Image: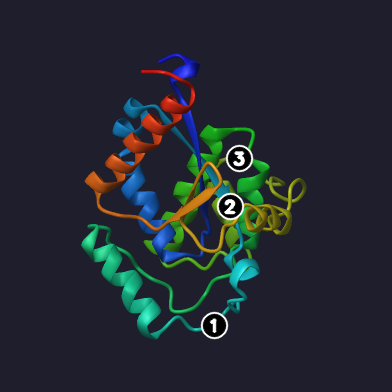
Amino acid sequence: MEMADRHPLPVYYDFASTICYVAHRVLGRLAPRIDEIGVDLEWRPVDLTGLTGWRRGARVTGPGRENALRVASELGVPVRMPGFWIDSRAVHGVALALGGDPVKEAVWRERVWSAIFEEGVDPGEEGAIDRLVTDVGIGEDIGRTGPSIEAATDRAREAGIQGVPAFLVDRWPMGGIQEDQSMIAFFERYVRKRRRERGEP
């Protein structure tokens, strides 16, 4: 497919979010179809604490937890949900440092999300991030310099992002994740819209 037929679509996420993990799994199983449609997802990390004021380390209980587990179940994604809101800043630092290498960045997202929501790893624990970096072989000092998650979160706020996951369709954030066919329909509508704007059939 030629570059003119590709349509970038930003998707904002926080490693701490269970719903973002569910979105990662849903979009992963849809990846061949998404590629066929012509959409290139551009994953952009944000710190949801910086957007919402949620307290790091706060227990995740009640309706919020129940809703996240319900969505995961309905979308067929097994999840081991942490009992507290994790500190995702360091793992986001690595993702941002890898922003110029989409392949390594994708490997990092997979490793971090599987560690948190399948293995029960707290990436904020001492030594955890170094072990994760070693697991994927991306260099011991990666993520210690470069773009900051605070700056990335500020840019997301300026773009109108108020929660995650969120797809930025032109200037309009579309939040959440749905079942497979609804997501495919969403991507197809997005591409049709982009083509109409360019005067294509």
Location of residue 173 in the rendering, given as x and y in whole percent from the top left corner: 50, 52
The quadrant holding residue 127 is bottom right
Residue 183 vs residue 20: left or right? left
Between discs 3 and 1, the one toward the N terminus: 1
Compared to residue 173, the image places residue 83 above or below, namely below
Using the image as rendered, state which of residue 159 and residue 133 is in the foreground: 159
The quadrant holding residue 125 is bottom right
Between discs 1 and 2, the one toward the N terminus: 2
**Disc 3 residue type (three-letter):** Ile
Q: Residue furthest top?
A: 2
User: Dot 1 corresponds to which residue?
Assistant: 58
Residue 176 vs residue 141: left or right? left
Q: CA distance from mark 3 to mark 2?
A: 18 Å
User: Dot 2 corresponds to which residue?
Assistant: 45
Location of residue 74 in the rendering, given as x and y in whole percent from the top left corner: 22, 63
User: Dot 3 corresponds to which residue?
Assistant: 138
Q: CA distance from mark 3 to mark 1?
A: 31 Å
Instruction: Please report contact status of discs 1 and 2: CB closer than 8 Å, yes or no.
Output: no
In what element is the residue under mark 2? strand
Q: CA distance from mark 1 to mark 2?
A: 21 Å
Location of residue 190 in the rendering, given as x and y in whole percent from the top left corner: 39, 37
Compared to residue 14, the image places residue 199 above or below, namely above
Compared to residue 171, the image places residue 67 above or below, namely below
In what element is the residue under mark 1? loop
In what element is the residue under mark 3? loop
Instruction: State the scheme by which the image is colored.
Output: rainbow
Location of residue 162 in the rendering, given as x and y in whole percent from the top left corner: 55, 63
